[in-house]
Image: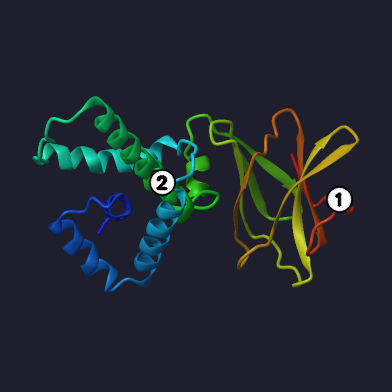
Amino acid sequence: MSDERLDELIALAALGELDAAGEAELDALLAHDANAAAQHRDAVDTAADLQSAHAAAPPEHLRASVLRAIGDEAQAGAAVPPVTSLDAARRRRMTRTGWLAAAAAALVLVVGIAAITTRGGLDPVEQVLQADDRVERVLSGELGTIRVVHSADEDAVVVEGSGVAAIGPDRTYQLWLVDGEVAIPAGLFRPDDGQISARFDEIDPTGLVVAVTEEPASGSDTPTLPILASA
């Protein structure tokens, strides 16, 4: 089952609008997939908690999966509701809207924010690396081959590299943005078998020097010389 289909089934479950076929499809998946079962429980519980709250509008790409699921049901021939009073219609619409917001908010929390929801099938690192507005620079220095890719649309930077020397468990590499005599800490990373692939959000290196140092495992407020790589 695709992730998109799973999102739709969980959204409908949170809305309480799964039909018999959808319930059977979801039940079959939940019986054999512990992660999907946990996502389902969290989404339904969170939707119930948020139903009475005034939830903020969720990101459009997640809200769309809920709306698409509802639209598919309508196109499949959902029953036309009976004529009712204007007040009753308003009350029903408000209740349904509350459930929709709750379900969409649940998807944000469960399927992943900062953490980690994918867009268009791409993981968060690839979203930056394949962004149309990406700007890349290659760092010079002693740390193998390292590039820093920035996307203003993603409001993020990716540090990617190979041949990076291993360091002890009590040490880390730290990324800095340097503006004259001011160095701004931008993130910590450690190589895995010489490879680096890390995303840092809300980082904009435009017009600044990007530098890397080796620091204690918790990072530092100011760079420890020497600068190992920069651009």
Q: Mark 1 points at which residue?
A: 221
In front: 45, or 223? 45
Q: Quick one: label 1, few (<14), some, or many (20+) residues within 10 Å?
A: few
Give the mark, 1 or 2, whose residue is nearer the N terminus.
2
The answer to whether 23 appears left or right of 120 in the picture is: left
In front: 160, or 107? 107
Q: Mark 2 points at which residue?
A: 102
In front: 55, or 140? 55
Q: Say whether residue 185 is visible.
A: yes
- What amino acid does circle 2 point to? Ala
- What amino acid does circle 1 point to? Asp
User: What sort of colour scheme is used for the picture?
Assistant: rainbow
Residue 21 placement: quadrant: bottom left
Q: Where is residue 212 in the image (x, y as percent from the top left)?
A: 77, 50
Q: Where is residue 93 in the image (x, y as percent from the top left)?
A: 30, 34
Instruction: Determine the residue located farthest toward the top in the rendered image.
Output: 86
Q: Where is residue 167 in the image (x, y as percent from the top left)?
A: 75, 68
Q: Quick one: label 2, few (<14), some, or many (20+) residues within 10 Å?
A: many
At x 27% / y 52%, what residue is drawn?
16
Q: Say whether residue 64 is visible.
A: no
